[in-house]
Structures are given as structure tokens and as C-alpha cells.
Image (cartoon, rainbow, N blue to C red):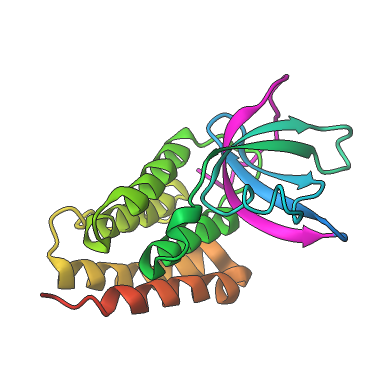
Amino acid sequence: MMDDATPPSLPDAGPVPQIVCAVLAHGETGAVVRLLGSETGLVAAYVAGARGRTLRPVLIPGNLVAADLVRRSESRLPTARVELVTSRGPWLGEPLASAGIAWACALTAAALPEGLPLPAIHGALAALLDAICLAPSARGWARALAGYEALLLREAGHGLAPARAATADWPGLLALLDTQGPAIASQLLAERRRDVMAARAILLDRLKRIGSD
């Protein structure tokens, strides 16, 4: 269960693959970045110069980076040095793809505890992001999105969401996404639901414009 978080454990040395989930400006040029790794779980780290010309395109939610995490004391955030591995930048100009990436990353950053390795969730998010970028249309990745939301609900111990995404037609899939929304807002996001659910509302509005044809 995701509630049983332990203090973040960091790799002994060297950069490790991480998915950028959220970036919050901190200071004049830096940012606190939430990174999801298979072994580290969700980790918040300070990145100096994150909003500069060099790192700004690297620290985009959805990007895969190699991050060298260093914790100097238990009372301070770790620092991170990052290098780009895979960019989602080319898809930010696509309204549906950009909304899908934004929601998946915002949900992950808000719903997961820090420092709890959840390799199944890490793998599912990586697969979802790849699907958003590689599928020919949103119809090809919306089922993966519904499945990812259901996985988070199950892993959090909030009951089994209906596993109907794989077989549902398009109207049925949209109905399933509508059904999962309240559970996500109340059971995964709590007091953060208003800000984070706004990204989901944008995504669902765009998906519904596709229609059922």
C-alpha cells in the first residue's frame, strides 16, 4: 500500500533513470523537482539552474532524465544533477498529447508518497508516456491512461477499479474515465484535488471532442 512510506533512500552513487513528474520554481533560478525512479520511488530534489536556458528543456514533466542524487543531511532536500535521456518536448505542441502527459505526471507527483519504491507504477507510467507519444491517436493511449489511474487506486488500497478499459468501446471508455474521477479526487489527492484535477478536466474535455465516430 502506498501509505506505508519510509524515508527516501537514494542510490549509493552515479546517475539513475528518473521520470520528471513536477517542477516547482525555487529561488531565482532553481527548482524543486519531483522525480520518479524504479528503485527510489518519488523523490523531491533541488536542481540549481533549473530555469536556465540549458536545463529548462530538460526538466519538462514526462521527460526521462539521468539524475545524480546527493543527500547532504536528513533535514535538507537532496540535490540533483540531471542529463536528458528522452524528451517529450516534441509532443508539447499537440493538444491531446500534452494534456495527457501533463495529467499523468501531475497525478503521479500528487498521489504518491515520497521514498517508497513502486516499480510497477514506475513501469506503468513509463509505458503510458511512451504510448502517448507513439500511438497514432488518443484512441490508442486513452485505455492505457484509464488503466494507469486504476492501478494507482488499487495500489493505494482504495478498492479495485473496474478493469473494463481494454474491452470498452470509445463511449464506454469515456464513461469509465468519468467514473474514476471522483475516486481519484477524494481518495488519492485529498486537499490537493482542486489544482491537480484541473489538468484532468482539460484532458477529458479534449478527449470528448473526438466523439464516437
Horizontal placement of 79 versus 150: left or right? Answer: right
Horizontal placement of 78 versus 180: left or right? Answer: right
Residue drawn 82% across the image and 32% down it:
71
Residue drawn 19% across the image and 57% down it:
164
7 part of magenta stretch = yes
Task: Name which quarter of the figure residue 174 lies in.
Answer: bottom left
Horizontal placement of 154 versus 196: left or right? Answer: left
209 part of magenta stretch = no
Quadrant in the picture for the C terminus? bottom left
Horizontal placement of 78 versus 10: left or right? Answer: right
State whether residue 23 appears in this view.
yes
Q: How many marks?
A: 0
Residue drawn 43% across the image and 77% down it:
201
Q: Nearer the viewer, residue 3 or 140?
A: 140
Q: Nearer the viewer, residue 89 or 201?
A: 89
The x and y percentages for residue 160 are 32, 53
Q: In this rendering, is residue 59 above or below 119?
A: below
Task: Name which quarter of the figure residue 37 lies in.
Answer: top right
Residue drawn 50% across the image and 62% down it:
102
Give the residue at the far front of this rendering.
53
The x and y percentages for residue 118 are 51, 37
Q: Which residues are magenta?
A: 1-26
Q: In this rendering, is residue 147 above or below 201?
A: above
Q: Nearer the viewer, residue 131 or 195?
A: 131
Task: Name which quarter of the figure residue 140 lies in.
Answer: bottom left
The x and y percentages for residue 16 are 61, 28
